[in-house]
Amino acid sequence: MPWLKFKLRLDHDRAEQAADVFEEIGAIAVTFEDAGDQPLFAKAREQTPLWTHAWVSGLFPSGARPQTILSHVSRSLGVSEATPHESEIIADQNWQLASLAQFKPLYFGGDLWVCPSWCQPPNPGAVNITLDPGLAFGTGAHASTALCLEWLAQQSLAGAEVVDYGCGSGILAIAALKLGARHAWGIDIDLDAVQISNENAARNGVVEKYTVRPAIALPPELHADIVMANILAQPLMALAPLFTKLVKKGGHLLLAGLLIEQTKQVEACYARDFALSTRAREGWALIIATKT
């Protein structure tokens, strides 16, 4: 089948982060090109001192929509949708095996694993989430999602009421449900995410305990034990009044999708009502807030 090649022109730091987002939403390959005239050479991506400005390209299934990809990157990294970008359909090649090899089971501590459907779970008796890469954010490969999953794997969630705000693929809500939560709400402004997260919940046998909504449509009386928001720094700050009201006293709020340098600004919006701690990985941060 044909494939969609989508590319963005970004500065050094954002190009690396955009590559992570591309892989998270289903790119089977990611490449970098010089956006100016600055030759640099290295043997592996993790050793590459990227150009000051670079084109980062992702190879996606032909059904992927360029605007959807751009919106994901914009929301994840805080870049403008006016960022220079290009897309083209290219002829089929033998990329299927490369795609399957790229996505492998991921372990997040405790009994929690996330496995693509084509892989045998390494531990069949563990809490295994079946999730394939697609056009909704969240497979566990991105550092932001991984930090949230690792925190969930360490908790006792029996009977908990959970909200996953900006649910994407539904991975965080599904993980909470499979770890014992009583019920989870999924909220996302992306209609693709609403549909995909519901399908993923059904695939994992938790759809009857999962309520997904396309906008801010939570019951006004709802108070949750855990609220998770793996979105972006600006909306995390704007939503502080809603999240503060939504979390029960003694409950937890996970704030993710922000860069390490954005943590102090976000923490300032929650410090009055929450005890705060931070975990970080690969330039991304997770704020764990406990309501006091």
Image (spheres, rainbow, N blue to C red):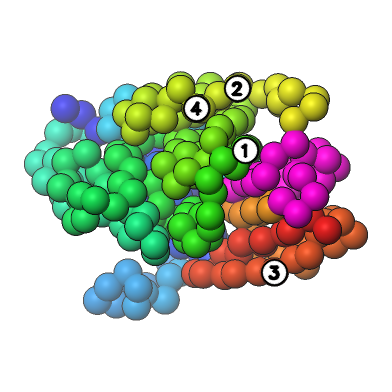
Q: Which of 269 and 232 lies nearest the eye of the viewer?
A: 269
Q: Are marks 2 and 1 in contact (CB under 8 Å)?
A: no
The kind of residue tagged 4 is Lys
Question: Mark 3 and mark 1: span between their CA atoms?
Answer: 22 Å
Q: Which residue is mark 4?
A: 209
Q: Which residue is mark 2?
A: 213
The kind of residue tagged 3 is Ser
197 relative to 233 in the view: left or right: left
Q: Quadrant of residue 86?
A: top left
Question: Mark 2 and mark 1: span between their CA atoms?
Answer: 16 Å
Residue 226 in magenta?
A: yes
Q: Which of 179 and 78 lies nearest the eye of the viewer?
A: 179
Residue ID at (30%, 40%): 130
Local secondary structure at mark 4: helix
The kind of residue tagged 1 is Glu
Q: In the displayed image of the protein, which residue is found farthest to the front?
A: 159
Question: Mark 4 and mark 1: span between their CA atoms?
Answer: 10 Å
User: From which residue to which does the magenta span run?
Assistant: 223-251
Residue 66 in magenta?
A: no
Q: Which of 288 and 285 lies nearest the eye of the viewer?
A: 288
Disc assigned to residue 287: none
Q: Which residue is mark 3?
A: 277
Question: Mark 3 and mark 4: span between their CA atoms?
Answer: 30 Å
Please tell me which of labels 3 and 1 falls first in the chain: 1
Disc assigned to residue 161: 1
Q: x%, y% of residue 152?
A: 51, 55
